[in-house]
Amino acid sequence: MNNMTIKLNKRQKDVLKALLNKFEKSKTYRGENAVNQSFQVKPRDFFKDYDSDFANLDEQEDFERELQVLEDAGLIALSCENSVIKSIGMVISSQDRFYSLLGRTELKDLEKDQIDMYSSCLGKNEVLDSFCKAQIKRLAERKKAEYELPEAREIIGILKYICGNTEEILERELSIELFSNSKTFEKEYRGKVLTVLKKHGNFSDLIENIPDEREQGHAILAEYNIYPNPTYVNFKGDGILRLRDGKKIELSVSMPIAIDSDTLDRIDNVDVVSPRIVTVENLTSFNRVQDEKTFFIYLAGYHNTAKQSFIKKIAESNKDKEWYHFGDIDPDGFYILEHLKKQTGIAFRQLCMSTKELEKFREYCKPLEGNDVKKAQSMIKKGLFVDEMQYMLKNNVKLEQEVISWKQRI
């Protein structure tokens, strides 16, 4: 009986798949075994009650007939005892027919196709290189790649686009661009792509103090100018925004404005009149604070590359200004300050973020949470803001900046 005359049902296919899986995992398949191996499965793996006293006899006979068809075709060898099938063995010489009947690509060919595909993607960018090399290593060690080939191709295509993106794009627009559907990226690939970026990108510092997984995703994608919604930079203070087309926008303490991230590139420079510049962590505090001698900036979210570049642009044309950051007096707030300093190269000083404020507004303080304690201890080990971290740990306190912007002039 040849392949053309065999029509397999699901259970017969399951038997062949199980035997072929065992065979492909063996040294015999790789040609590395000096001893002959046999590959067997049990009837009860496919018919749970086969050798049970409670088995339905008609179903048992149907199952035996199905196996007999496979044995007559030379695909399997049945081992019986008192007319009861005890094991189902693979006829190794018929392995090619297994692949043909199951419509399955041989594992070695599949591994080669995957290695070739991953190798062809090397040299595009660091994240892709790291991801692809990891998959090639897994396959060389005869482990499965992390994603099936069709899905891996889609993920790589998304990563190529994301890592090369330089202009602001919304997540749904990204999905339309790549899939002609506004929801496909969110529904099928967002989580997988972020898993790859977290594992193979350099984002540990960025997301270290963001507890919510979805917000971590927003922060990482923002580094590639990808947002769930349009983002803005808010200003208030005396100064002039000068655009590349020659236009200028007068700024005032009493008249805040918001500039969308896409427009930031059109700004040539910002002339700040005020002697100090303060970045503010939270919008409520930004709206509350007033000081004629201060130029306030609220970054409306994460300090991604585009916003960091814009801050550096302001610093370059305002070298005589003092820079401060005003944020929550908790480990996260100090992490944001440190991240700003590190990413912009600007010597930010903390504003109203000291043990003095924790003492003064003790009645408004909240107790630390588990993550706060870990982050504070981590900062102490790194030698960062040691006095403030030790005070928080000793007194079990943290304070939201909204209290300070409400209760005192900064």
Image (spheres, rainbow, N blue to C red):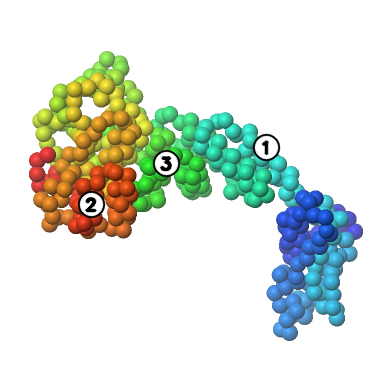
Crowding near the residue tagged with mark 1, few <14, some 14–19, many ≥20 C-alpha atoms within 10 Å:
few
Determine whether the residue tagged by mark 3 lies in a helix, strand or loop: loop
Q: Say whether disc 1 or disc 2 marks the residue closer to the N-terminus.
A: 1
Q: Residue at x 82, y 78 (%)?
A: 84
Instruction: Identify the residue position indicated by label 1 in the image.
Output: 116
Front of the two marks 1 and 3: 3
Could you tell me which quadrant the C terminus lies in?
top left
The quadrant in which residue 28 appears is bottom right
Could you tell me which quadrant the N terminus lies in?
bottom right
Q: Amino acid at mark 3?
A: Phe
Give the alpha-carbon distance from disc 1 to disc 2, as whole Å: 54 Å
Q: Are marks 1 and 3 in contact (CB under 8 Å)?
A: no
Q: Residue at x 21, y 48 (%)?
A: 388
Residue 180 place in picture, x, y as percent:
52, 38
Instruction: Identify the residue position indicated by label 3 in the image.
Output: 203
The total of numbered circles placed on residues is 3
Between 229 and 71, the residue placed more toward the observer is 71
Residue 197 place in picture, x, y as percent:
48, 42
In this rendering, position of residue 249 left or right of residue 264: left
Residue 178 in view: no
Residue 337 in view: yes
Determine whether the residue tagged by mark 2 lies in a helix, strand or loop: helix
Crowding near the residue tagged with mark 3, few <14, some 14–19, many ≥20 C-alpha atoms within 10 Å:
some
